[in-house]
Image: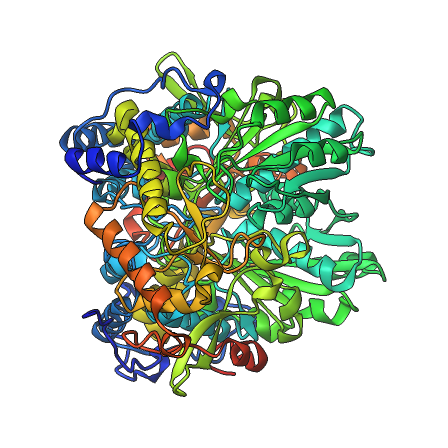
């Protein structure tokens, strides 16, 4: 900010009477008389105040079994360091590519790495979060084939259905849910096949799904999808060991990128990861970085295919997205690169192992305490016999977890009214599992 | 000129072969055999790089990237102000940063307090009555706001006939895109001779079909729509709603507000007005605020206070539902809370005053060389045209790059030829303002052939964008 003296000079030089005269275009009756906020505080005072408020959060005294869309994973120290680089974090969308090659190359590498991870053809340079990316994928499918039926698994969280509903509000489409087998937690392929017809726009599959299950039947859906689009929603860390969507015929793949080195941050900023078949690129939303050359033939990167976007196509654009999650894309790229193939595979396998450990431990107490037989990834559903005692027991023993399945998917609240999620990652200690099991023993 | 950006022939990550060094603890045992056969992944062909190489790679890339911390960045409509470092520090406090979005409310009272206070702050700044922090970017706020328009008319049984949203031709591209995404037809109203909305033309467009009017004020030409009161009446008399695009809020904090102007729905761009880092394109954050009669339409949850306790309210009567996974981009909300708390009433008001002064100072300095259409007083940004100099806006932009500063937004708004949109914000010294104007004037005086050679101080020269679109090399496999 210019100094007081400079401000006075600038006012004079510009031919104004005062700072206030800069606002003379605002009619008097629209001038704000007062701004009802406290006076400014010093940096020291502000940080003190923020620390006090941070201390009002008590969760860190608890053992963590929270998941269901946001996971406490190991984050290499270098990830936060890289995204804190001031040249990255204080820049904006690379409208001037010559002076933004660093970010452009990093986003090109992000797109490439996600293509390698998912084995899909093309990845855009980020969406807001996993769920909005899913909703955009559903819209994209409608743009591609103009068909009206959207098939979702009945175990999908209500929050996802709600966001999809918001996103298709202006489209003539309808949502229908297909059955998930209660015993295995797998897609009921017969039920799904019976719902697919000539007006089906897309089939959404989740892996792991809303019951926490890794579902081998996702690999069969391409056989029954007909001309519709297969949209997969998967956990990116699981892909370290689990078959990627590109291998089972997904037309569009979306994921929540938070598990890839992003802090949980009470729900955001997260990262929507979106990939698709190359034939669909013109109908896709979001920014895309391409490789080209400069005037001297040197390799260079630039935003490309912008004629799909709002700043050029306005109401005819593929999406309204402008600001995206570039910095979070960078974080996920740094995370994947630092872990490498062996590290990512291990994070995935450790998650499967810990999920199995928790399941086995609880099934030792009561055989049918875990209601599904399929292999679990992170979110372990647990059915208890004394649900009313669960929360007090957890609070008393300082355990965070036990998100009610009925809160996540109300349509299943009848059969699963006594089922709660306890989630694990590679960070979960054996002693944590033991502690939880002891507490659950009383209510199980 | 002595500026030169660091230049490396930096290989792509997959070309490093040093082998990953990072260790995830634990023993996997036979976990691999627990994966169903059909789902076993055989190959994982991602880069295999030592951590030190990864850090060096990104550090070198960062040096080939221009940011606000390196210098003046007056990209019009983007409000590239200094991002205070206290906000980074606060948002990195583990109690905030590592908290789970679905944690029991009793365990995250600090988070809820931050959100509640931010809601109250935004109400005070905008003179609106209720806030939702859920939308994740400005355009996402627009879309959410237009969904409220839709639901409001649906509930009144008027959606069938109210199919149009009117938008000025100078509007940000997100406005028509958001309106169309929510299923409305877009009707464009032209700007008049003074750069503000042509009220007579507007009257001719408003009809029984009109659902809403979307506008930013000051508009994208940096001019205050002084007829806004009259415009609001025109729409309200027809039962239509007014939507305020808050992208240009940095012009008016403490001076006027969308609530006073008669708007029904507003979005804020926290990353612009409240200085949260733009992150190379995001994350942003786009909370929305509404007047009392639309309170029950907000996305859920909203944060409420009972006694000394904060809680989420998920049951608003007419809610449009949800627009994202959880309850907003908390890490960004926290930074904006810090910025508003730090600046206070006095600071925010002064920030807008100085942002507007800086703009008018630039206008004064450039007026002898550049065409400055519309004689109106400028607010937080101004649009100049290089047409008067006979030079292309893009050529001058590239000349500015070689001076180590960031060019204006070019070729926007679309209604003006060779447009260059300059938004200095308040966080710039007079020295930099003077230097910037000098460079713009100097560039305009160069002959065209010489301008075409710029930039030369960057790692690459001008880029073949046509080839990028034609070849579609969108990843390192293609």
As drawn, A392 above or below A314: above
Residue A48 x %, y %: 17, 30
Identify whether A403 is placed above or below B428: above
Report whether A393 appears left or right of A247: left
Nearest to the observer: residue A139 or residue B280: B280
> Is A417 rendered above or below residue B462?
above
Nearer to me, A111 or B249 = B249
To which quarter of the image does residue A39 belong?
top left
Viewer-side residue, B410 vs A342: B410
Residue at the limit of the structure toward the bottom, as seen here = A297
Give coordinates of residue B289: x percent, y percent: 51, 28
Furthest toward the right, the residue is A198
Q: Is residue B221 left or right of residue B95?
A: right
Q: Is residue A265 left or right of residue B183?
A: left
Taking depth in this image into account, of B198 and A36 the one nearest to the observer is: B198
Quadrant containing the N terminus of chain A is top left
State the image quarter where residue A400 is shown. top left
Residue A19: % across, % down: 30, 28
What residue do we see at 80% from left, 53% from top?
Answer: A148
In the picture, residue B113 is in which quadrant? top left
Numbered circles on residues, count: 0
Res. B461 visible in picture: yes
* Residue B30 appears in the picture as rendered: no
Q: Position of residue B31 (x, y in %)?
A: 42, 67
In the figure, is residue A148 to the left or right of A47? right
Q: Residue at x 71, y 20 (%)?
A: B237
Question: Which residue is most to the top?
Answer: B307
- Residue drawn at (78%, 68%), measured in percent from left and top? A227
């Amino acid at each position: 900010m210019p100094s007081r003296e400079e401000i006075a000079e600038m006012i004079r030089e510009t031919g104004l009477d005062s700072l206030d005269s800069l606002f003379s275009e605002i009619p008097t009756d629209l001038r704000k008389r007062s701004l009802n906020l406290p006076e400014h505080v010093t940096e020291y005072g502000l940080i003190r105040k923020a620390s006090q408020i941070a201390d009002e959060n008590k969760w860190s005294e608890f053992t963590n079994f929270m998941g269901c869309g946001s996971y406490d994973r190991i984050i290499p120290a270098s990830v936060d360091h890289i995204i804190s680089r001031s040249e990255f974090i204080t820049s904006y969308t690379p409208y001037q590519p010559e002076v933004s090659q660093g970010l452009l190359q990093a986003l090109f590498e992000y797109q490439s790495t996600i293509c390698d991870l998912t084995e899909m053809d093309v990845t855009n340079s980020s969406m807001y979060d996993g769920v909005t990316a899913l909703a955009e994928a559903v819209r994209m499918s409608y743009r591609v084939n103009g068909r009206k039926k959207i098939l979702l698994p009945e175990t999908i969280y209500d929050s996802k259905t709600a966001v999809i509903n918001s996103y298709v509000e202006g489209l003539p489409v309808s949502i229908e849910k297909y059955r998930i087998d209660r015993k295995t937690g797998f897609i009921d392929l017969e039920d799904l096949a019976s719902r697919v017809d000539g007006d089906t726009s897309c089939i959404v599959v989740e892996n792991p799904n809303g019951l926490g299950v890794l579902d081998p039947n996702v690999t069969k859906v391409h056989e029954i999808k007909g001309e519709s689009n297969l949209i997969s929603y998967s956990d990116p860390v699981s892909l370290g060991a689990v078959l990627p969507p590109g291998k089972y015929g997904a037309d569009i793949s979306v994921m929540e990128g938070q598990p890839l080195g992003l802090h949980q941050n009470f729900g955001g900023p997260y990262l929507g990861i979106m990939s698709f078949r190359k034939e669909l690129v013109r109908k896709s939303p979001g920014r895309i970085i391409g490789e080209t050359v400069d005037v001297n033939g040197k390799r260079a990167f630039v935003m490309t295919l912008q004629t799909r976007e709002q700043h050029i196509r306005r109401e005819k654009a593929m999406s309204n997205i402008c600001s995206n999650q570039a910095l979070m894309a960078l974080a996920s790229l740094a995370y994947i690169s630092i872990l490498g193939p062996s590290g990512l595979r291990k994070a995935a396998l450790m998650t499967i192992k810990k999920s199995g450990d928790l399941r086995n431990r609880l099934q030792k107490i009561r055989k049918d305490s875990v209601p599904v037989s399929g292999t679990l990834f992170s979110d372990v559903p647990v059915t208890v016999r004394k649900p009313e005692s669960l929360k007090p027991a957890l609070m008393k023993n300082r355990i965070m977890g036990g998100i009610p399945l009925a809160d996540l998917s109300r349509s299943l609240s009848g059969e699963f009214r006594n089922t709660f999620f306890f989630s694990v990652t590679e960070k979960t200690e054996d002693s944590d599992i033991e502690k939880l099991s002891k507490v659950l023993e009383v209510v199980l | 000129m002595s500026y030169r950006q660091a230049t490396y022939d930096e290989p792509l990550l997959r070309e490093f072969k040093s082998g990953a060094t990072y260790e995830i603890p634990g023993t996997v045992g036979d976990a691999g055999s627990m994966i169903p056969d059909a789902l076993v992944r055989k190959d994982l062909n991602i880069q295999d790089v030592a951590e030190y190489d990864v850090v060096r790679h990104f550090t070198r890339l960062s040096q080939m990237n221009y940011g606000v911390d390196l210098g003046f960045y007056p990209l019009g409509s983007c409000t590239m102000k200094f991002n205070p470092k206290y906000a980074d520090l606060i948002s990195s406090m583990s109690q905030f940063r590592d908290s789970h979005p679905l944690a029991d409310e009793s365990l995250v009272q600090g988070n809820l307090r931050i959100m509640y206070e931010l809601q109250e702050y935004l109400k005070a700044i905008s003179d609106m009555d209720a806030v939702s922090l859920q939308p994740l970017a400005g355009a996402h706020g627009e879309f959410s706001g237009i969904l409220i328009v839709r639901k409001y008319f649906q509930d009144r049984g008027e959606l069938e006939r109210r199919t149009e949203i009117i938008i000025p031709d100078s509007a940000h591209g997100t406005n028509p895109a958001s309106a169309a995404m929510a299923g409305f037809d877009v009707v464009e109203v032209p700007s008049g001779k003074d750069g503000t909305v042509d009220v007579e033309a507007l009257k001719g467009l408003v009809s029984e079909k009109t659902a809403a009017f979307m506008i930013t004020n000051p508009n994208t030409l940096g001019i205050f729509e002084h007829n806004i009161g009259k415009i609001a009446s025109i729409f309200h008399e027809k039962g239509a709603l007014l939507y305020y695009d808050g992208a240009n809020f940095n012009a008016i904090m403490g001076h006027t507000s969308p609530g006073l102007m008669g708007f029904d729905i507003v979005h804020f761009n926290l990353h612009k007005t409240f200085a949260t880092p733009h992150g190379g394109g995001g994350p942003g954050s786009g909370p929305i605020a509404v007047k009392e009669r639309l309170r029950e339409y907000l996305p859920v949850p909203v944060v409420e206070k009972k006694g000394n306790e904060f809680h989420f309210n998920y049951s608003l009567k007419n809610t449009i539902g949800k627009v994202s996974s959880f309850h907003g981009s908390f890490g960004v909300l926290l930074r904006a809370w810090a910025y508003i708390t730090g600046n206070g009433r006095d600071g925010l008001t002064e920030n807008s005053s100085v942002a507007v002064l800086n703009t008018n100072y630039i206008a004064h300095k450039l007026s002898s060389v550049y065409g400055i259409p519309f004689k109106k007083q400028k607010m937080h940004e101004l649009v100049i045209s290089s047409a008067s100099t006979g030079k292309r806006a893009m050529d001058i932009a590239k000349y500015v790059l070689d001076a180590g500063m960031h060019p204006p937004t070019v070729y926007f708004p679309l209604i003006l030829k060779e447009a260059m949109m300059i938004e200095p914000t308040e966080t710039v010294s007079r020295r930099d303002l003077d230097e910037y104007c000098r460079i713009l004037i100097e560039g305009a005086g160069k002959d065209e052939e010489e301008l075409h050679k710029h930039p030369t101080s960057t790692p690459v020269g001008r880029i073949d964008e046509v080839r990028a679109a034609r070849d579609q090399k969108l990843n390192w496999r293609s």
